[in-house]
Amino acid sequence: MLNIQGINQYYNQSHILWDLDLELKEGSCSCLLGRNGVGKTTLLKCITGLLPVRDGQMSLKGQDITRMSTENRARSGIGYVPQGREIFPLLTVEENLKISLGARPDKARQIPPQIYELFPVLKEMKHRRGGDLSGGQQQQLAIGRALVLDPKLLILDEPTEGIQPNIVRDIGEVIRKLNSELGLTVLLVEQKLPFARRAAEHFFIMERGRVVANGEMTALDDELIQRYLTV
Ligand SMILES: Nc1ncnc2c1ncn2[C@@H]1O[C@H](COP(=O)(O)OP(=O)(O)OP(=O)(O)O)[C@@H](O)[C@H]1O
């Protein structure tokens, strides 16, 4: 459903992504792995349109999105939960969720009830300011905000970073549910291997701006871990 072919990306003169290819199958749940600085976040930002690619091609469900704006990619079905969550601390939980409503093609005015069903804590706290929530609650809010747009592909950048273990478990369950029950295609960047193994069925490993290995999560063995992931 997402097809990336030969993309190159630069920060000024620094060449970060090198002829990178990646393909996500419809309904799959994949984890992007790799040591710090190999280009994982950069790749996610290229997929969402936050960063331009110099060349190469990206398509979503057959539609060329390579030069499409971030807003139009969101409307086309790409949901993004950024690293560090980036919620609006002074807006309430409800306002944080409503901000995305304007971009829905159907111009819905109400927050889809499913979001409060997935994250009951957001309903309980809907009048609280985003900045007053715990890290785990803010992460749930960031995922909820991405879901407001009813995405087909959900991209999450380190969703468990700095979050207490019981909430990490909840987030893992929500990701599984979104993928297996609601059919969303999921791509996440994750440093915690046990979480990655539980949440995703496929892996992609990046090194120096390229995808150097990929496969079923069950094939992620000690040799690959030693070679590409151990610090
Ligand atoms: N805004 C920027 N300007 C210049 N260089 C950048 C910028 N953002 C990232 N880089 C560099 O690009 C490279 C890839 O960074 P990126 O954040 O994509 O890696 P990553 O694999 O996500 O790492 P991490 O696991 O630490 O988040 C790194 O060398 C980083 O220093």
Image (cartoon, grey):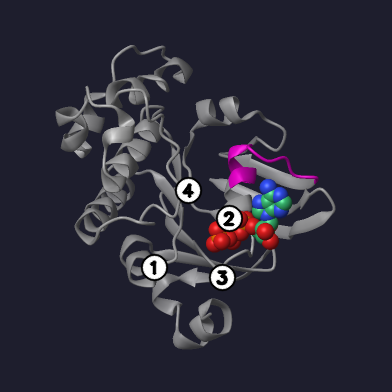
In which quadrant of this rendering is ligand 1 seen?
bottom right
SS assignment for the magenta stretch, majority:
loop
Q: Which residue is mark 2?
A: 23
Q: Are marks 1 and 4 in contact (CB under 8 Å)?
A: no
Please tell me whether residue 164 belongs to the stretch shown in magenta: no
**3 or 1: tag closer to the N-terminus:** 3
- Whether residue 9 sits left or right of residue 229 in the image: it is right
List x then y, in percent, for residue 189.
48, 57
Asked where in the image residue 211 lies, by quadrant, the reply is: bottom right
Task: Look at the image and give the residue range highlighted in magenta.
Answer: 45-54
Q: Are marks 2 and 4 in contact (CB under 8 Å)?
A: no
Helix, strand or loop for disc 4 = loop
**1 or 4: tag closer to the N-terminus:** 4
Above or below — where is 22 with respect to 108?
Answer: below
Whole-number angstrom distance, CA of label 3 to CA of label 1: 11 Å
Whole-number angstrom distance, CA of label 3 to CA of label 2: 21 Å
